[in-house]
Image (cartoon, coloured by chain):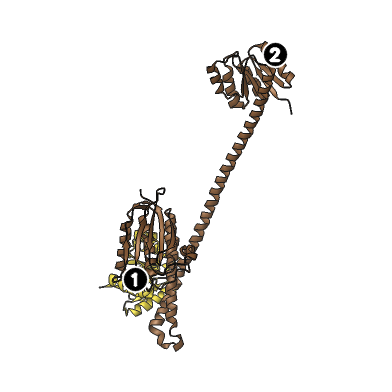
Chain colours: A yellow, B brown
Amino acid sequence: MSVAAPDILLVEDSETDIVLFKFAQQSNRSTTTIEIARDGVEAIEFLLGGEADTANRGKSLPRLVLLDLNMPRLDGFDVLQRLRADPRTASLAVVIFSASDHASDEQEARRLGASGYVRKPSRFETLCTTLAELERDWLQR
Amino acid sequence: MKRATLLIVEDEAIVAADLEGRLVRMGYAVCGRAASGEEALALARTHRPRLVLLDIQLQGTMDGIEVAHILRAELEIPVIFLSANSDETMIQRASLAGPYGYLLKPFNERELHTNIEVALHKHQGDRQLAAAHLEVQRLNSTLEQRVRERTAEVEAELREVEAIAYAVAHHLRSPLRGMEGFAYLLRTRFTEGLAEQARHLPQAIHTSAIRMGHLLDDLLRFIKLRRQPMQIERVDTAAIVHDVLNEFASLEPGRLIEVRIDELPHCRADATLLRQVFVELLSNALKFGHKDRARAIVVGAHPPGEDSDRQIYFVRDNGIGLDARYADKLFRLFSPLNPPHASREGTGAGLAIARRILERMRGSIWAEPSPGGGATLLFSLPGAA
C-alpha cells in the first residue's frame, strides 16, 4: 500500500472499467494519482484498515472515493454506510460511480450520505469529459 | 310412474275424509290429513309430500296462506289452495305465497285431478330450471375464478420474462463499454500500426458498438414503460407539442424544424407519456424526409365523431412514405421496416414505444399514406369532454 495517499480511490470490480478509466486519464493528460480497490472489502481495508490497524489511518485518506455500487462481497451501499459511520471517513468525499439507472439506487445512495451520484458513461469520449469534471469539482485545490 | 304422495290440510274432518277418498280413487297416495297449520308442517316435514292441498281457513294460530309461505321457503313443497273464498283481497294475498293452483269450493273431480297434475308437472319443471340455473351460476363463478388465476399466472410470467430481458440488456452494457472504448482507442490512437486493409476495422467495430448501445437503451426504455407510473388527467396537447418542438430546436440549434401545428383539443392522458409519444412521432417524421421535397410536417386533430368520446390526433409528413402492405409491422419493436440510423433517434423502437404508451393510456395508433406522398401516423385517446 502506498505511503502517500492517492488523489482518487477507485472502487471498481470490473477490470474493463478499470482499464478504460486509466486510458481516459491518459487521454486527459491527467496528473491525478489513483489507487484501485477491487471490491468493497478492499475499499474498507484501504480506508479504515483492518480491525487492529487503526493507529495511522485517516492520515492518508484519498481526496475522493469513486464507488461502484454493484460489487461482490461488500457492495457500494455497505461500503458507504461503514464509511459514514466512522468518524475518520464521515466527511470524506464519496461519489457513487455506477451504471445503475434506477432512481431508487440514487435515492438510497443519497440517503446513506453519498457526496454525489455520477452515472458511468456508456461511451469513452463521455468518460473522459466526466472524469475531467470530477477532478475539477472535487480535486481542485 | 310412482304414485304421487299428497297431504291434505283441511279444518273440517268430514271434508278432509271425503277429499282423501277422492284422491285415493284417482290413484294418489295420501300421507296424512291435518286440521291446523302446526300439524300440517309437522306432517310435511316428516313425509315430504309432492304436493299439499291447503284450505285457507284452518284450526290453530296460522291460516293456510302462512302455512304455504313456510312450505315454499323451508321445504320447497308446492301447494294448491282449496277455498270457498273468492274475495279479491284474499286471492291477492294467497297469490303472494306462490301457489300452484287455487280451487274454488265446490269443485269436481275432473278439476281437482287436472289441477293436481298441472301443479306437479309445473313444480318439477321449476325445480329443474332452478337446478340448471344454479349449475350455470357455479360454472360462471369457477370460470371467472379460472380466468383470474390464468391471467395472474400469465402476468407473472410476463413480468419474469421482462425482468430477465431487462437484466440481460443491463448486463450487456458493461462488456459493451469495453468494446466501444477499446475500439475508440484503436481508431484514434493506434490505426497507424495496423495493416492497410485493416485500418477501417476499428471504426467499424466502434460504430457497431455504438449502435448496439442504442439498441440496449431502447430495449430498456421499452421494458421500463410498463412499470412507469401513470397519472391520467386532462392535458393540454398543444402545449405538449410546442414543448417537444422547442426541445428539438434546443438540442440541435440551427436545424430547421418545419412543423405546422393545427388546433389541438385537450384529451385525457398522462402528460409525460403523451409527450413521449409526440417525441417519437415527430422524430420519426423528421427522420424520414424525402430528398426531392421540401419538408412539410403537420400536427393536427380530427374533429371527434358524434358517437365517439375519443380524440384523434395525427402527425403527417411528406417524406419517403410507408408501404401499406406492411403497415402493421411498423409498430413492432426493432421492426426492420424502420431503417437503422446512426443518429440519436434511430433503432426502430420509436413507434413500438409510442404504441405501448398509447395502449397503456387506452388509446391506439395506426398509419396511413399521406395524400400526395409521405406517411400519416394517427392515434386516438379518450377525449377530455
Chain of the residue where label 1 is placed in the rendered structure = B
Query: According to the image, label 1 marks what residue?
Result: B294
* Label 1: how many Cα within 10 Å (few below 14, some 14–19, many 20+): few
B8 in relation to A23, above or below: above
Secondary structure of residue under mark 2 = helix
Q: How many labels does the image show?
A: 2
Which amino acid lies under the numbered mark 1 shown in the image of this protein? Answer: Ala
Q: Which amino acid does label 2 sit on?
A: Asp
Point out the frontmost of discs 2 and 1.
Answer: 1
Residue B95 shows up from this direction: yes
What is the distance, in whole Å, between disc 2 and disc 1 at their CAs?
Answer: 107 Å
Q: Mark 2 points at which residue?
A: B18
In the foreground, B374 or A35: B374
Q: Which mark is residue A44?
A: none
> How crowded is the residue under tag 2: few (<14 C-alpha within 10 Å), some, or many (20+)?
few
Residue A115 seen in the figure = no
Q: Outermost residue toward the front?
A: B372
- The chain to which mark 2 is attached is B
Q: Position of residue B294 (x, y in %)?
A: 34, 71
Q: Which of B70 and A85 is in front in this view?
A: B70
Location of residue B80 by image quarter: top right
Q: Position of residue B315 (x, y in %)?
A: 37, 62
Q: In which quarter of the image is the N terminus of chain B?
A: top right
- Above or below — where is B111 with respect to B256? above
